[in-house]
Amino acid sequence: MGVVEQIRDAGVVGAGGAGFPTHIKAGGKAEIVLANGAECEPLLRVDRLMMQHYPQQVVRGLKAIMESTGAGSGVICLKKKYHDAIDALEQAISGEPNIRLFEMESYYPAGDEQQMVYEVTGKVVPTGGIPLDVGAVVCNVSTLINIANAMDGQPVIDKVVTVGGEVKRPVTLRVPIGTPIRLLVEAAQGPKSLDGYTIVIGGPATGKLCNDWDEPVTKTTGGVLVFPSDHPLIQKKTDQKEVDWKLAKAVCCQCNICTQICPRNNLGLGVEPHKAMRAAFMSNGKLLGDYNGIFSCCDCGLCSYYACNFGLSPSRMMARMKAGLRQNGVKPEKRIRTSVSQSLECTKVPTKRLMSRMGILQYDTETPLDEQGVSVSIVQIPLSMHIGAPSISVVKYGDRVAKGQLIAEIPEKSLGARIHASIGGIVTNITNNMIEISAQKRDKE
C-alpha cells in the first residue's frame, strides 16, 4: 500500500486548524514541502512540544510527503526561540541532505502558510490559489507525525491540545477525539463552571467563542483557553453586527492603518480593510474597490486586535463581506494585484506586543506536555471535522467497537476523511452530526 492510501485510510487531515484531507495534498506534485511548526497563535504550545518530543516522526512524515509529491527539498519552519525543538530537530535531520530548518522571528502571523511560503521561497500564492500553485505543499508538524503513525497502521484517534488562560495548571494534553472540553479544563484545574467565564476554542486571535462544556475535541482543536466573560478579548470576539456598523459609521476616520499593517496586503494581494469599513458605513459596495482582495483575507484579526486605534473590528466586516460574496456566487480570480510591499518587514507585529494589546500577556506561560492527564469514559466524535463532506457512519447503535476501528467512511466521490473510534466501547448514540461511544458496558435490557 502506498503512502497516499495509508494517509487516507488513517483519516489524516490538517491538524493545524484547516482540516484539509491530507491524502489529497500527498497525491499532488510539488518542488518543496514546508513543515509548519511556527505555531501562529499566541499562548498555544502544541507545535513546539511535538517537535521537541517527536522530532523523528516529524522528519519521517516530511520525507513521506516529499516522496509522494516528488519534492526535492523539505524545510521545517519554526521560530528561533524554540531552542529545545531546534536542538531535537537538528539531530533528527542529521544525514538528511535535502531537509533543513528555517528559523523565523517571533511575529504574528508567522504561521500563516502564505507568509511562510513567501519567506522560504520568495514566491507569493495568488488570491484564490493554494501553495501548490507555486510548487509548494505545506503541512503542520502534528499532521506529519500523524502521517508517520499512518505508515505504521495507526489511525488518527487523539489530539494534543493546549489548555490555558484562567487555569491553575496550564498544560498541553493528549486526549481522545470527542473528549468533552470540560475534562480538559478540569485537568488544568480551571473553573468548576462557566458562570462568569467564556472559552475560546483554538487561539486567542482566530479561535471561536464557546459556552458549551460538552463541546468535543476534534482533529483540528489546538487550544482550549478560559477567560473571564468580561475580558476585553471576549468582548472583542463577540459578534455584534449592528454595533459594528454603527461604530464604523460614527468613528472610522479612514486612516487606513488597518490596511497598512495587513500581512496579506503587504504580500501584494490587495486586502484593504479600510475600504471594507468605508463600503459598510456608506452602504455602497462600489466603495469596496477591488473585491478580489476580500478573498485573500486570512482572518488573522490584526486589523481589529492591533491596528485600529479606535477599537473597531475591520476583520469582522471583511468576514461578513467575504461570506456575502460567496453566497452570491462570486468567486475569487486567481491573481496577484501588486508587488510585495517594501514595508513588509517593518510591519511585522511582534507576538508579545500583540498579546499586550489583547490583554493576554499574563497568560503566556509554559504548558508542559501531559500525555496521560485525562480519563475519558464517553466521547462524542463529530462526523465533520474536516474540509469536505461529513463522513458517513458504518456502525450502528449497540455495536461494540475497538479503539482505532473505522466508524465512519468518506462519502462516495466526495472530498472527506475517514473517522475511527478514539476509545473502545459501545456505540450509545448516532446522529447526523456525531457518533457517541461509551466505555461503560450497556445495561441489560
Image: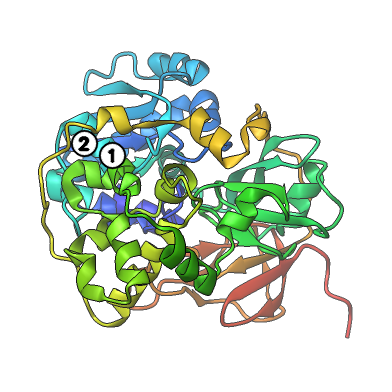
Residue 94 lies, with reference to residue 285, above or below; the image says above
Where does label 1 land, which residue? Answer: 115
- Checking the image for residue 64, the label placed there is none
Q: Secondary structure at mark 1?
A: helix
Picture residue at 55% right of the left edge, 69% below the top: 240
Residue 247: x and y in percent read: 49, 64
Q: Nearer the viewer, residue 331 or 255?
A: 255
What residue is at 72 percent from the left and 65 percent from the top? 212
Circle 2 residues within 10 Å: few <14, some 14–19, many ≥20 = some
Q: Secondary structure at mark 2?
A: helix
- CB under 8 Å between callouts 1 and 2? yes
For badge 1, the amino acid type reads: Gln
Figure check: 102 above or below 441: above
Q: Is residue 55 above or below residue 263?
A: above
Q: Which residue is mark 2?
A: 118
Q: Give the position of the C terminus as an image quadrant.
A: bottom right
Residue at horizontal 65 percent and vertical 62 percent from the top: 210
**What residue do we see at 69% from left, 57% from top?**
179
User: As shown in the figure, which amino acid type bears the numbered disc 2?
Assistant: Tyr
The answer to whether residue 19 of the structure is visible from this angle is no
Q: Left or right: 246 with respect to 6?
A: right
Q: Residue 161: percent from the left, percent from the top?
A: 61, 44
**Quarter of the rendering containing residue 216:** bottom right
Which percent across, then down, holds residue 133? 14, 50
How far across and down, in percent of the image, does residue 96 sit?
27, 19
Q: Could you say which is closer to the camera, residue 296 or residue 427?
A: 296
